[in-house]
Image: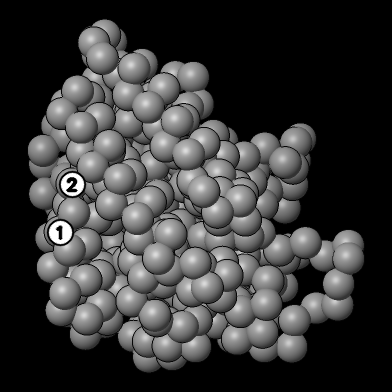
């Protein structure tokens, strides 16, 4: 390796595992009992998710709202349903399927000298299971919930221990189900009203009434009667310490100043990290904001096809144009200029590749 040290960070869902599968949707549509599914599934997966993206886009320039909040809202719904961490861990591990070539990809990174980071907005059991499988320290996993601290405790002995005792807020939230459900109903209503004001979230358009709704949001948190629940919800949701999306993903790399980063992501939640990383690479990506933030886009079924690009980066030979010449059957590379010139073609190619990958992974 020549030049400055290069470090690696990967999103989990879509990059390492299960293309097209969102565990938040699994919770909402497969695990909630019928009454709560009717009450929450579409509201969170569709309307709240649209609000989440629109507000992130509207406030992106000032690093305001983090998109990637939907998995946390799904976890709140799980708490209202009385689901436990053990049930969620078991379900996520049961559904976990690696994408083709992931083993070779991770082993290549290990051989470069440093294990990769896994940075996911999802429930942590899947990423931690992968980390355990490939000898990646749990310190290197950043996920929904509380982030792991190492200065004050011994390493966890299992994925279950790490999730239940250190990462997930679910055990506490289960004790606050009544107050949590009352808050969720009011909060989702407010977010739907914000979505009406925000529209598509374009930041260059002033949204009349949005600041008043933000003040109402502050009042909503302030008026939670249960002091401990108020503290938890402010920390997790209002202060966004329980959310690992958007600029929180970018901050993971910012905390290691002076390093060059390769980041692989595939969705809107990865856009800020793709922009932050010197080598932000979108893979099988169909989101315009993520593609517009990437230095390169790759459509591939087999993730090991990305290794020659990594080799060029670590050896100081990389240019987008050089990477573009690596195209072969099942491996297409788009430069930022390609994305700008023909975004619909790029998105269609990525979508077709992701669908082919999904069929292989049997999702």
* Residue 244 pos. (x, y %): 51, 51
The residue sitting at 72% across, 41% down in the picture is 255
* Residue 203 pos. (x, y %): 30, 17
Q: Relative to residue 261, is residue 356 depicted above or below?
A: below
Instruction: Tally the numbered discs.
Output: 2
* Residue 358 pos. (x, y %): 21, 74
Instruction: Quote the CA–CA distance across marks 1 and 2.
Output: 7 Å
Of mark 1 and mark 2, the one earlier in the sequence is: 1
Disc 2 residue crowd, few under 14, some 14–19, many 20+, Cα 10 Å? some
The residue sitting at 15% across, 28% down in the picture is 196
- Numbered circle sitting on residue 42: 1
Question: Mark 1 and 2 residues: CB-CB less than 8 Å, in contact?
Answer: yes
The residue sitting at 19% across, 23% down in the picture is 197
Quickly name the residue at label 2: 47
Q: Is residue 228 visible?
A: yes
Q: Relative to residue 321, is residue 155 depicted above or below?
A: below
């Amino acid at each position: 390796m020549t030049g400055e040290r290069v470090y690696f960070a990967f999103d989990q869902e879509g990059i390492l595992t299960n293309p097209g599968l969102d565990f938040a949707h699994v919770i909402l549509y497969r695990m909630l009992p019928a009454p709560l599914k009717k009450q929450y599934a579409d509201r969170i997966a569709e309307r709240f998710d649209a609000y989440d993206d629109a507000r992130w886009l509207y406030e992106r320039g000032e690093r305001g709202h983090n998109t990637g909040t939907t998995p946390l809202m799904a976890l709140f719904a799980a708490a209202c349903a009385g689901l436990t961490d053990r049930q969620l861990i078991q379900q996520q591990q049961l559904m976990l399927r690696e994408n083709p070539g992931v083993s070779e990809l991770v082993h290549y990174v290990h051989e470069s000298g440093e294990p990769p980071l896994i940075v996911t907005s999802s429930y942590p059991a899947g990423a931690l299971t992968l980390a355990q499988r490939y000898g990646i320290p749990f310190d290197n996993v950043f996920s929904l919930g509380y982030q792991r601290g190492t200065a004050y405790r011994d390493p966890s002995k299992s994925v279950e221990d790490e999730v239940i005792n250190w990462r997930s807020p679910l055990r506490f939230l289960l004790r606050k189900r009544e107050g949590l459900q009352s808050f969720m109903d009011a909060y989702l209503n407010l977010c739907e009203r914000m979505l009406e004001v925000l529209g598509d979230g374009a930041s260059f358009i002033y949204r009349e009434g949005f600041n008043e709704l933000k003040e109402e949001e502050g009042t909503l948190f302030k008026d939670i009667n249960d002091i401990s629940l108020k503290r938890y919800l402010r920390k997790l949701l209002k202060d966004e310490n329980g959310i690992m999306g958007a600029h929180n993903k970018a901050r993971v790399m910012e905390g290691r100043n002076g390093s060059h980063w390769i980041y692989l992501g595939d969705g809107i939640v990865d856009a800020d990290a793709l922009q932050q990383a010197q080598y932000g690479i979108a893979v099988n990506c169909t989101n315009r904001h993520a593609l517009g933030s990437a230095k390169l886009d790759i459509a591939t079924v087999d993730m090991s096809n990305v290794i020659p690009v990594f080799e060029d980066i670590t050896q100081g030979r990389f240019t987008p144009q050089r990477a573009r010449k690596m195209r072969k059957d099942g491996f297409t590379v788009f430069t930022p200029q390609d994305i700008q010139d023909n975004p619909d073609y790029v998105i269609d190619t990525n979508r077709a590749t992701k669908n082919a990958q999904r069929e292989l992974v049997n999702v």
